[in-house]
Amino acid sequence: MQNEITFNDRFPELKEENIKAMAKRREDYSLHRDIKAREENEAIARRFERDKEKQQ
């Protein structure tokens, strides 16, 4: 059948350099996500502190 998708068409042969590159991208993404989450959490905490001070 012409419409069949073979495994190698969608997932090329894994090479060590590609595996290392994928691991580096995942690590970079995780680091960026964690830094962004910390910044956002700190901003929320500062906003709660300001709101708390306004209420007093």
Image (tube, rainbow, N blue to C red):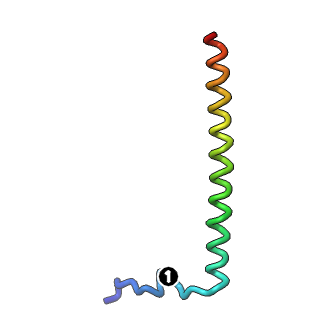
Question: Could you tell me how many numbered marks the image carries?
Answer: 1
Residue 23, quarter of the rendered image: bottom right
Measuring 53% from the left and 85% from the top, which residue is drawn there?
Answer: 12
Quadrant (top left, top right, bottom left, bottom right) of the C terminus:
top right
Measuring 67% from the left and 83% from the top, which residue is drawn there?
Answer: 17
Quadrant (top left, top right, bottom left, bottom right) of the N terminus:
bottom left
Pinpoint residue 51: horizontal percent, then vertical percent. Answer: 62, 19
> Looking at this rendering, what residue extends furthest in the top direction?
56
Q: Is residue 52 left or right of residue 4?
A: right
Q: Is residue 41 above or below residue 52?
A: below
Pinpoint residue 28: horizontal percent, then vertical percent. Answer: 68, 62
Q: Is residue 41 above or below residue 20?
A: above
Pinpoint residue 20: horizontal percent, then vertical percent. Answer: 66, 78
Pick the front one: 5 or 33 = 33
- Element assignment for label 1: loop
> Looking at this rendering, what residue extends furthest in the left direction?
1
* Residue holding disc 1: 11
Measuring 61% from the left and 79% from the top, which residue is drawn there?
Answer: 19
Label 1 Cα neighbours within 10 Å, binned few <14 / some 14-19 / many ≥20:
few
Residue 32, quarter of the rendered image: bottom right
Q: Is residue 3 above or below residue 52?
A: below
Q: Is residue 20 left or right of residue 13?
A: right
Dot 1 amino acid type: Phe
Pick the front one: 45 or 16 = 45
Pinpoint residue 42: horizontal percent, then vertical percent. Answer: 67, 36
Measuring 68% from the left and 28% from the top, which residue is drawn there?
Answer: 46
